[in-house]
Amino acid sequence: MMQAKLSILMPAYNVANFIGEAISSVLSQSLREFEFVIVNDGSTDSTEEIIRSFNDDRIVLINQENKGIAVALNKGLEMAQANYVVRFDADDICYPHRLVKQYQFMEENPDYMVAGSSADYIDQSGGYVFTSYPNAYTDPEIKAVLKKTCPFIHSSVIYRKAAIIKHGGYNQHAHSFEDHLLWQTVLAEGKGINFHEPLIQVRLNPESITIDEQWRPKAFHVIKNSVIEANEITAEQGEQLLRIIHSQNNRQLKQSAYHSLLAKKFLWNNYQPQKARQNLDKVIAQNRLHWKSYCFYALSFLPKPVLQKGYRLLKPQAVYLTRQKQQHEQ
């Protein structure tokens, strides 16, 4: 096997419907010298069988009991051989030149610890929904927002393995925001950046354990905000988070959160009011008392200029970032 310039790190749990496409997008990268570390986190479907169907000696398969994404990621980090680690999720898709662009940047900029990118979001069937631009691009911008919001799309990042290992890897108690907690510590000693160009497709998947945080109860947000502010988390807080997540781990809620998110994106980010209403119909059918859905339904009948003006008032930061992106492209 060739010397690996990169270690691609992918956790996988019950993603048989999508992992084949994800693996293919990595194996067809223009940069070829990598190892592909896949941690199968106790999948009960045909995920492992699909992984083994790929005959490529760059794939390193690790099987473990279901212990959660943070444990899976730390196990993969332990096994990774390259100096750079590229994160990727098993239901996403890499664009062909992702690896070479991120690798070249890290080689040329040794003071940078983490580099992420924008991402094109798709629905569970692969249809384009919208393009997500990070809420910060340069290192000063990233550090300015770090306490308020996670500045990276996790599956878009490349980072220096040594920097992550030095700080203990992913905290297994910070369920669903283990990456955000990690960036706070790592970026205290180095720089971060986001590329304007989308380098991946992120799939919105209703079967995912992670759901839109707007559907999380207040108790979840209170704990998370406290943890991010303190930059530390206790085992007890982790258990509280896990109980909340498990209580919401049901098909009806996940489907509702999924269709609600699609509806919002088809209003604010990719104006298609008919698609927004189609998704809202599915939310309301399962949650007739979800008042926000009725509000969005009413908004979907507004003309595009009126809706966008309201969006600029409600989300000035999002508009600012879009303008930044346009300026960089000119």
Image (cartoon, rainbow, N blue to C red):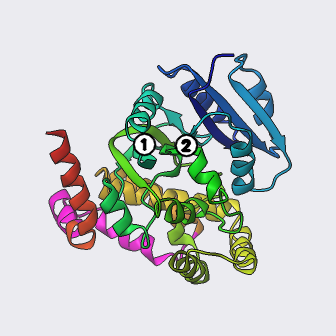
Left or right? Give the position of 245 relative to 322.
right
Residue at label 1? 110
Query: Can residue 20 be seen here?
Result: no
Left or right? Give the position of 312 relative to 140.
left
- On the image, the x and y values in percent for residue 255 come to 60, 58
Up the image or down, 139 lies above or below 55; here it is below
Q: Is residue 295 magenta?
A: yes
Considering only order in the chain, which callout, 1 or 2, is on the residue closer to the N terminus?
A: 1
Q: For the residue labelled by badge 2, is the local secondary structure a helix, a strand or a loop?
A: loop
- What stretch of residues is rendered in magenta? 287-311
State which quadrant residue 76 falls in.
top right
Q: Quadrant of the N terminus?
A: top right
State which quadrant residue 85 falls in.
top right
Q: Residue at x 59, y 66 (%)?
A: 286
Q: Quadrant of the C terminus?
A: top left
Q: Residue at x 58, y 77 (%)?
A: 227
**Overall secondary structure of the magenta section:** helix
Q: Nearer the viewer, residue 107 or 36?
A: 107
Q: Amino acid at mark 2?
A: Gln
Q: For the residue labelled by badge 1, is the local secondary structure a helix, a strand or a loop?
A: loop
Residue at label 2? 124
Q: Nearer the viewer, residue 19 or 59?
A: 59
Q: Which of the labelled discs sits on residue 269, or is there none?
A: none
- On the image, the x and y values in percent for residue 60 come to 74, 29
Q: Residue at x 34, y 56 (%)?
A: 139
Q: Is residue 318 magenta?
A: no
